[in-house]
Amino acid sequence: MGSWQVGTDTLARSRFVLSPFAETFASLRLLCAGTGARPGEEAWLRAHLPGYRARLAADPVTARLVPAALGTSWIADFFCPTSCVGEGFEETVARVRAAGAGEARADLRVSLRGRLPAVLEPDDLPERASALLTYVWEETVRPYWERRRRVLEADVVARTARVSQGGWAAVLDSLRPGMTRWLGDSRFQVNLNAYPPREIAAGAELLFMPVTPKTSCISWEGRERYAVVCPCLGVLADNHRRRPVPAGLGALMGTARALSTTQLVAVTGQDLGSVGRHLRVLLDAGLVERQRAGRSVLYVRTAAGEVLMEASAPGTGDRDAGRRGDRTGHRRRPLSDLARTMESGTWSVTEGRRDP
């Protein structure tokens, strides 16, 4: 397993950062994969995958560059620099463009674990890489950035709230489930690869960057900046398909749409008024309570909400349902939409070297 030695001071100064470049790079990986893990990703791919593939078909060098740079267990360093705090997409991609030709080829040999094919010998590989990343940003991410940014902001609020509930260990365990976990003795497991431990020097930045596609990676810049890119708790919103409210939830959730994730406003696609009405029903039902944190209003499950959450979990109540059924003779559906809504326990409405 790969692990980082993280000092107490470094962990205390670590922070969550929203990175347009990390979001763009995660979206590029989704385009390269060609298939999504969530309904919203599939809708986004249907809209943008044809254009992306047409662009690569017109540029055979870039078409070979992308899979070579993504590698199998190591991403070419020049292709994915670690974003700085407050850095915009243009500033980060400029560092891709500024990479030297020799540096790019050397990084590609590492990601490919061998010799470069002749097609990847040109000196303009950094320019081609930056041009493709800019295309992905401008055509497939930037039009949705405001919504995605709200999703990511809500994710950060939910994760930071978890610090007070389970400490930093709980947060680190949840970043990349199955890959990241706090091992104790200042050791942070970052992946399952057999890499030697890296010691994060005192004074280095440790950044956590949530992205909306279900993908993740780690990266670092020299010895001064380390980042963990992790999938956020929310999902890419699908504007075109509305899931029906499960039977029995109409009075609780309203008939427009059941809330399906913790990132209420951004992910559901509902306007703030609609989300507010849903929350008012939950508040009146005693399933959530309000808390204020800075400029954000947090909605946290109450004990009654916890009970309903447990009753809604997949498999709960199925034994009785299998015997009784419902009035139509079908098995009763678990309250999955509400369960997904309440899965993290906290929602917010805000005011005003590398591996796959």
Image (cartoon, rainbow, N blue to C red):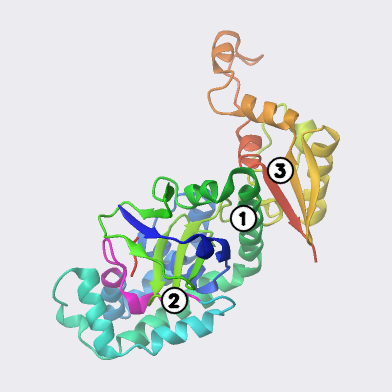
Pinpoint residue 23: horizontal percent, then vertical percent. 51, 67
Is residue 209 visible to us here?
Answer: no
Q: Secondary structure at mark 3?
A: loop
Q: Secondary structure at mark 2?
A: loop
Q: Amino acid at mark 3?
A: Arg
Q: Which residue is mark 3?
A: 257
Quadrant for the C terminus, please.
Answer: bottom left
Please tell me which of labels 3 and 1 falls first in the chain: 1
Q: Which residue is mark 2?
A: 224
Do labels 3 and 1 touch, CB within 8 Å? no
Pinpoint residue 292: horizontal percent, then vertical percent. 80, 53
Residue beneath the point at 61% across and 69% down:
145
Q: Amino acid at mark 2?
A: Glu
- Residue 78 colored magenta? yes
Magenta-highlighted residues: 67-83
Residue beneath the point at 72% across and 26% down:
248
Please tell me which of labels 1 and 2 falls first in the chain: 1
Q: CA distance from mark 3 to mark 2?
A: 46 Å
